[in-house]
Image (spheres, grey):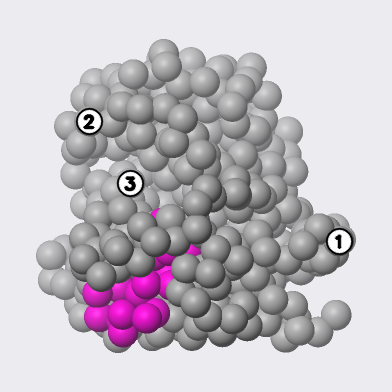
C-alpha cells in the first residue's frame, strides 16, 4: 500500500468526512501502518491545538456575522478522534478520548479542567507507547532512575521497592503537563505498560477532585492522589487491580 | 522498549519527534494562537469553523458559499500554512526554553 494515496485523504478521514465504507478501509489501514498512524497522531494534535487556541480567539465582527447567517441546526459530529482507537496497533491499548460533546453537555470549569487534565495525561501515556524511544533513562533500578531526575525537575519523589512484586520499572523521562515540569515513569506488568506521572501539586492551576474521576468512561484505568505536596497519576491499560496495587506501592514508598 | 525480532509482527507507529510534534506536545496555546492570527483571514476562518464550530464540509460550503472541492483544498492549504507558520516560530521558542534552563 503506497502511503502517499492515503496521505491525501488523511485530513478528510480525521474530519470524519470520508463516508462509511471508505472510513472503515481507512481504519484498517491506519491500524496496520506505523507511518500513517504517526502522521494521524500529529494531525490530531494540531486539530486539538487549533480548537484550544480558537476557543480563546476573538473573532472579527464580519466573521461573527457570517457564522450567524450560516445554516442551522448543526448535525451531530461523528466521533472525531476515533482513529486513536486504532493507532496504537501493536499496543493493546484503546484510548477513549474525551470529546467536545462531553463539554457541551456538562458545565463548570472544574469539570472542564478535570477532563482536560485526564485527557492530557492519557495523551502523554499513549504518545509514550507509540514512541520508539519512550524513556530517556533506561533502568530497572530505582536508585539509578531517581537521581537522574535531580536538576531536571524542581522536586524529589520516592520510587517504591518492587523486588517481590509483579511490576518492573522500565525507565523514566521528563514530561510537561500544561507547562508544569514533572516526572514520567514507565512500568511493566505482564506485558502491559503503566505510566506514573508526578507533578508538584501547587504548580497545577486548579484543584483536582479525584473522587469525581470516573475511570469507566475511559478504556484504560487511572488513579490519582496527592501526597507530600505532589500530585500522582497512574494510568495504563492494565487491570484496575494492577493500577491499584502499583498505586498502593507508591503511596507506601518512604 | 527494545524492538526484538519476536516483535516483528507488531506494528508500532513510527513516531519520529518532528519539531512540529514536540512543539504541539509542549507548547502553550499562545504559539498556536499567534500562528493562527498571522494566517490570511480566509484560512483562519475555515480552520476555526471546522475545528471550533465543528462544521461539516457541507456546512462550510454553504456558510462560505464555496463548492465542496474548495472547502477541502482550502482546509488543506490552511493547515499547511499553519504548520509552516509554527515551524518558523519554533526555532526561536526552542532557544527561549534553553535560556530559561528548561
Q: Is residue A131 left or right of residue A238?
A: left
Query: Could you tell me how far apart the alpha carbons at marks 2 and 3 are, in whole angstroms?
Result: 13 Å
Point out the tag, 1 or 2, that comes first from the N-terminus: 1
In what element is the residue under mark 3? strand
Per the image, is B29 magenta? no
Q: Which residue is mark 2?
A: A206
Please, which chain is the residue tagged with disc 3 on? A
Quadrant for the C terminus of chain A, please: top left
* A134, A217: nearer the viewer: A217
Instruction: Name the dominant secondary structure of the magenta segment.
Output: helix
Residue A220 spot, x, y in % from top left: 62, 32
Q: Secondary structure at mark 2?
A: loop
User: Which quadrant of the figure has residue A115?
Assistant: top left
Q: Secondary structure at mark 1?
A: helix
Task: From this view, report whether residue A13 is shown above or below residue A98.
Answer: below
Q: Position of residue A86 (x, y in %)?
A: 73, 53
Amino acid at each position: 500500500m503506497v502511503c502517499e494515496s492515503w496521505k491525501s485523504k488523511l485530513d478528510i478521514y480525521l474530519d470524519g468526512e470520508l463516508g462509511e465504507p471508505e472510513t472503515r478501509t481507512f481504519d484498517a489501514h491506519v491500524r496496520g501502518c506505523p507511518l500513517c498512524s504517526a502522521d494521524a497522531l500529529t494531525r490530531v494534535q494540531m486539530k486539538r491545538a487549533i480548537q484550544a487556541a480558537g476557543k480563546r480567539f476573538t473573532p472579527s465582527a464580519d466573521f461573527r456575522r457570517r457564522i450567524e447567517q450560516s445554516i442551522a441546526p448543526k448535525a451531530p459530529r461523528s466521533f472525531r478522534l476515533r482513529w486513536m482507537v486504532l493507532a496504537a496497533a501493536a499496543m493493546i491499548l484503546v484510548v477513549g478520548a474525551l470529546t467536545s460533546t462531553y463539554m457541551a453537555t456538562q458545565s463548570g470549569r472544574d469539570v472542564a479542567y478535570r477532563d482536560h487534565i485526564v485527557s492530557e495525561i492519557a495523551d502523554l501515556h499513549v504518545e509514550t507507547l507509540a514512541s520508539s524511544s519512550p524513556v530517556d533513562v533506561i533502568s530497572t533500578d530505582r536508585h539509578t532512575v531517581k537521581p537522574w531526575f535531580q536538576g531536571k525537575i524542581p522536586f524529589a519523589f520516592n520510587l517504591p521497592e518492587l523486588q517481590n512484586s509483579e511490576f518492573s520499572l522500565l525507565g523514566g523521562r521528563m514530561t510537561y503537563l500544561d507547562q508544569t515540569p514533572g516526572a514520567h515513569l514507565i512500568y511493566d506488568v505482564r506485558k502491559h505498560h503503566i505510566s506514573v506521572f508526578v507533578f508538584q501539586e501547587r504548580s497545577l492551576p486548579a484543584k483536582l477532585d479525584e473522587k469525581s474521576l470516573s475511570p469507566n468512561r475511559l478504556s484504560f484505568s487511572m488513579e490519582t492522589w496527592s501526597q507530600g505536596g505532589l500530585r500522582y497519576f497512574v494510568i495504563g491499560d492494565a487491570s484496575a487491580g494492577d493500577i491499584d496495587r502499583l498505586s498502593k506501592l507508591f503511596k507506601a514508598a518512604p | 522498549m527494545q524492538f526484538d525480532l519476536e516483535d516483528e509482527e507488531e506494528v508500532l507507529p513510527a513516531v519520529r519527534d518532528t519539531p512540529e510534534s514536540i512543539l504541539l506536545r509542549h507548547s502553550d496555546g499562545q504559539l498556536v494562537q499567534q500562528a493562527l492570527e498571522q494566517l490570511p483571514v480566509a484560512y483562519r476562518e475555515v480552520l476555526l469553523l471546522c475545528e471550533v464550530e465543528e462544521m461539516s464540509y457541507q456546512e462550510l460550503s454553504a456558510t462560505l458559499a464555496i463548492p465542496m472541492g474548495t472547502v477541502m483544498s482550502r482546509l488543506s492549504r490552511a493547515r499547511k500554512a499553519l504548520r509552516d507558520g509554527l515551524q518558523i516560530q519554533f526555532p526561536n521558542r526552542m532557544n527561549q526554553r534553553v535560556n530559561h534552563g528548561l
